[in-house]
Amino acid sequence: MMSPQTCENNNREKGTICKRANLTINSGERPVLLSLNGRGFYVLHYSAIPENEFTRIRFDLADPNTGEGGSAEAVVDPRLVEALNAHNRGQDVGRAFLIWIDTRKNEVRWQLRRFDKSPPNLS
């Protein structure tokens, strides 16, 4: 995985801007969960690159059932990244950030949900 400095240097040469979030997602306090075509994942890390009026976002994921890792990439409304960043910086402990991506409908939705003891299921 590239360090933020390497990412910045590589993309400066290509003439693009790269914003990389550090692995600051605390799954116990402020989890980020992603449903990709109905299959649920924990988001471990994300990075975003602005593209015209949209933003390309890359998620590093973990399957909660198997523990296997993977990644997903999507072109989304920049407000999703703004909301994710606000969630990670915020004081909203006890809230989970949920993202639904449905590639068949070409749809992305997100919301914050309060949870009591354990992060909510994506079902």
Image (cartoon, rainbow, N blue to C red):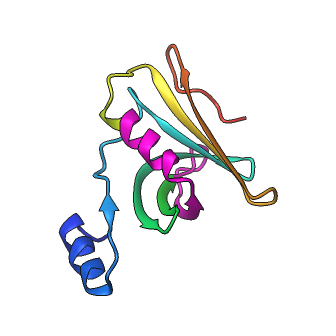
**Residue 102 or 119: which is nearer the viewer?**
102
Q: Please state the horizontal and vertical placement of residue 95, each as a whole percent of the image.
A: 47, 23
Q: Which residue is nearer to you in this view: 1 or 78?
A: 78
- Magenta span includes 116: no
As drawn, 113 above or below 102: above
Is 53 left or right of 107, judged from the image as shown?
A: left
Q: Residue at x 37, y 42 (%)?
A: 85
Residue 78 falls within the magenta-colored stretch: yes
Q: Nearer the viewer, residue 1 or 55?
A: 55
> In the image, residue 62 lies at what x, y percent?
51, 51
Q: Position of residue 36 (x, y in %)?
A: 67, 52
Q: In the figure, residue 5 lies in which quadrant?
A: bottom left
Taking the image as shown, residue 37 lies to the left or right of residue 4, namely: right
Determine whether 106 is above or below 2 in the image.
above
Q: Is residue 93 left or right of residue 72?
A: left
Question: Which residues, given as a range, are shown in magenta?
Answer: 62-87
Name the residue located 73 percent from the left edge and 35 percent from the top edge. Answer: 123
Q: Residue at the spot x=33%, y=28% of the render?
A: 90
